[in-house]
Amino acid sequence: MKLNYTEPKIFTGGVDITQWSALDKKQRNDALAKAWFVYFSFRDPDTGKLKKQPFIKAGANRFKGKTKRLQFLKVLQRNLLLLLEAGFDPYRDNTELEDEFRRRAIKEERPINNFPAKKEVENESTAAGNRERIDLANENAKPNPVPISEIENNVVDENKVSVAEAFELGLNIKESTLNDNSFKKQKSRITKFERWLAENEVDVSDINNIDKKTVVRHLNDVLRTSSPRNRNNTRTALSALFGTLENNELIDDNFIRKINILKSVPKRNKTYTPKQLAEIDSHLMNNDLLMRMFVQMVSYNMLRPIEICRLKVGDIDINDKKIYVKAKNKPVKIKIIPDIMLGQLPDLSKMDAKHSLFTPQGFGGEWNLADNDKRNYFSKRFKKVKDHFNLGNEYGLYSFRHTYITMLYREMIKTGTPEEVKSKLMLITGHATLDALEKYLRDIDAELPQDYSNLLNRSINKTDK
């Protein structure tokens, strides 16, 4: 049988308490300025679903320091769990349970309340056999005892976590699970949503004030000012955040999952013609050799521009003809360096293995910039080439990858079956599955039929007769 309750947890001002020592003074003060409390969910007898219960502060926030406040809440958390295990039910009369705890307290000669004003707690961090006693009594801030009845009849105000607090907690968790690039994109969309809430005068004192109607209004505004794709990405970012809030029991349900996804036409990079490839290569040869090498790595190694920007000098193994690159779909992938590329690489033996392979000044140097910003730099640098040839937005660095994969496929299909060709091509492109490769080939129009003029001629001749 499923439990009727979740284990009580402690909200610590929107920060990960295990990383407290790593926080700066401002971050600590901001966390302590917020309300800390114990929270849990209990199964609603009417719906059969777990429902968030009133938050329990019980005077914990009178303590100004992290240690005393956390110790106070840990005892409250532990005693609340004991109550729940003993049968405490916020939807029923708990008089018998309270009387039972009173009888136990009298028998054991300890305070009747479930949370004493003064309690010695064992410090879990000390070694076994040498446990240190910590006195929770504080002369300047003595919290009142918390009887069972106060847990049962907590005030409504205790049940509020502001939108800012909830979002901060969610983003702190997301930051530890996402890579830098993904986290920045998600945080940017969440920040825009917060600004939108302020501009539209939405009550943000309680995260539960944000409902489906509010989010749909925001998504409609995003759609009007940008595109269906951006609207869908915003929906995904908000859904991921609200999913985290649901998992941490700050909201009852992630309703954003129920909001529909709009159909959008993805932006596609066009492939270059053989004439364009020759003209661009000649131009780069005479004007920008570094950019030419960058383009060749996209073309010959089938790497994405951001993957090239992540490369360090030490990731290139000339002797073994291998490149170790961090890809978007797995931590590290190994790709061979074809001979056509090997001869183009500079001498890396005297360069620092920890330095970036590509920098604005040349090969092998320090470049302390986010990967996404590095990619943007080379995209802007290549735009000068595009402007020279009057190429539109549909052409870019990614177009070289599409072009050379298309060329490889059409050359290989001359001597092999589609199944054989795709199996070999997967090893070159790095696609994880055959389905993903086939979809990619369809998207870039790599697969084209043979000339069917003879079939048309036959059909026309039959019609004439």
Image: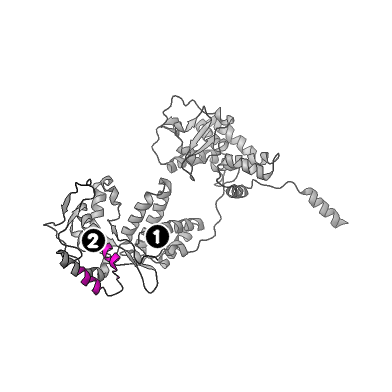
Q: Quadrant of the N terminus?
A: bottom left
- Rendered image: mark on residue 242: 1
Residue sticking out furthest to the left: 139
Please report the bounds of the magenta region as a residue range: 81-101
Q: Position of residue 128 (x, y in %)?
A: 23, 47
For badge 1, the amino acid type reads Phe
Residue 297 versus residue 14 in the image, above or below? above
Find out whether residue 191 is within the magenta segment.
no
Q: Position of residue 5 (x, y in %)?
A: 34, 65
Residue sticking out furthest to the right: 465
Visible residue check, residue 432: yes
Residue 71 versus residue 281 in the image, above or below? below
Q: Quadrant of residue 73?
A: bottom left
Q: Quadrant of the C terminus?
A: bottom right
Q: Position of residue 138 (x, y in %)?
A: 13, 56
178 relative to 291 in the view: left or right: left
Main SS class of the magenta portion in the image = helix
- The residue at the point 44 percent across, 65 percent down is 216
